[in-house]
Structure formats: structure tokens, C-alpha cells
Image: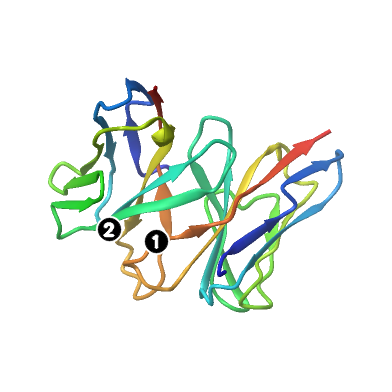
Amino acid sequence: DGGITQSPKYLFRKEGQNVTLSCEQNLNHDAMYWYRQDPGQGLRLIYYSQIVNDFQKGDIAEGYSVSREKKESFPLTVTSAQKNPTAFYLCASSINDRVLGYTFGSGTRLTVV
Amino acid sequence: SQQGEEDPQALSIQEGENATMNCSYKTSINNLQWYRQNSGRGLVHLILIRSNEREKHSGRLRVTLDTSKKSSSLLITASRAADTASYFCATDGNRGETSGSRLTFGEGTQLTVNP
């Protein structure tokens, strides 16, 4: 089955640590996105990539980094510079076509301990 | 920045009733989409309406779009307990880009359907 997979489902981070969230898709989608969702809130865009080896900052990129070395993969690193990282992180992908929607992964819940 | 704003923030109805959720946005758009999110899960795409369309149906879902008022509504008819979820509108703004899309999501409406 085609889909988008995020791992891990739950992640705990100590203060000052960097952690990397995985996002893999086998839909042959060109574009991939990372969103952050806080409790009871909507989604805010962190980074997005429309093509391999290229990505752009979203609305809240500070304290995060990404790479897009392969079409299938778009990992997100939450660095120690992100002061409030506890949130639900959602990865999505889409064909580069404005008339189609996004496919989302099932999310990673990150908690700082 | 949040482009869409849903109204109401929370809605509680009885099974069998209709549920209506509204979304307002600020800038011109290419299309508007509605998504559903079950608690602790990813979002699922429900329906997309283009800026030149006024109404669209999919099963028990009916979406309207009024570009003059910059607003959209999602109607779920004959609701079921399984419809309990958060519903988000998302807009694909007209940034003059020739390819790709970048959706901006509202804060969602939490719908509870009581059996």
C-alpha cells in the first residue's frame, strides 16, 4: 500500500538534545511538508520541500532543520535551539499540482523531559 | 500566520442531526480544502473546492465557497458518532507560483456527535 510513514510515534527528548523525526513516503510525491500542532490548535508550517535537494522555511522554522537528499525522505531535526519543542509533529506530501490535497502521516508526539 | 479561521471552535450535536462548520480566510485563494483529524492522528483530506466553484458534494458532505465574502462552509448531513473529530479548512493561497502548493490551516472545529 502506498502511504506516508512517520517514526517514532512517541519521542522523548532531554533538554539540550537534538532529535530527528523520520518521514518516508512511497507515493512518488514531489513535495513534502512538516507541520507542528499544539494542543487545541491548528497546524503551523515548519519547512517544506518541492523537489529533491531543495527546501524552504515555513512560518516557524527557527530551531528546526531538514534535509531532502531523496525524494522519499524528509527528516526533521529538532535542535536544542528550539525552546518549546513539546508538540505533535505532522509530515505530509503532495504531488506538485495545486488541485490535489495532501496526504498526512500519523504524526510524532515529542515531549521534553 | 493562520489564514483560515473556523467557527465554531466546538460543536456538539446528536446523532442524525446536521453539522455545519464555517471557515473564513483573508487573502485570495486558488482552492480551499477541508480535512478531518481524529484525536492523536494525522489529517485526512475530505474535499477540495476550487475558487471558481460555489458548491461541491461528496457523500454526506457538502461544501460551499463564497469568494466575495472569503468564506466557506462544510455541512455534514445525518451525522454519526463516527463523525466525531476535528475539522480543518486549509487554503492554497494565490502567490503567483506556477507549481506546487503550500496550504495554510485554520485552528479547526471540534465536532462531537453524541449517540
Q: Which residue is mark 1?
A: A101
Residue A58 higher or lower than B115, as above or below = below
Return the x and y of residue A84 as percentages of the image width and height. Answer: 70, 36
**Is any atom of residue B107 visible in this view?**
no
Q: Residues within 10 Å of mark 2 (few under 14, many from 20)?
A: many
- Which of A106/A80 is in front? A106
Looking at the rendered image, the quarter that the C terminus of chain B falls into is top left
Residue at the image position 54 percent from the left and 48 percent from the top: B42
Q: Amino acid at mark 2?
A: Asn
Q: At which x and y percent is residue A69?
A: 69, 77
- Which residue is located at x 39 percent, y 39 percent? B87
Element marked by disc 2: strand
Which is nearer the eye, B51 or A23?
A23
Residue A10 picture quarter: top right
Residue B22: x percent and y percent?
A: 26, 35
Chain under numbered label 1: A
Instruction: List the residue tagged with mark 2.
Output: B31
For discs 1 and 2, the disc positioned in front in the rendered view? 1
Total labels drawn: 2
Neighbor class of circle 1 (other Cα within 10 Å; few <14, some 14-19, many 20+) is many
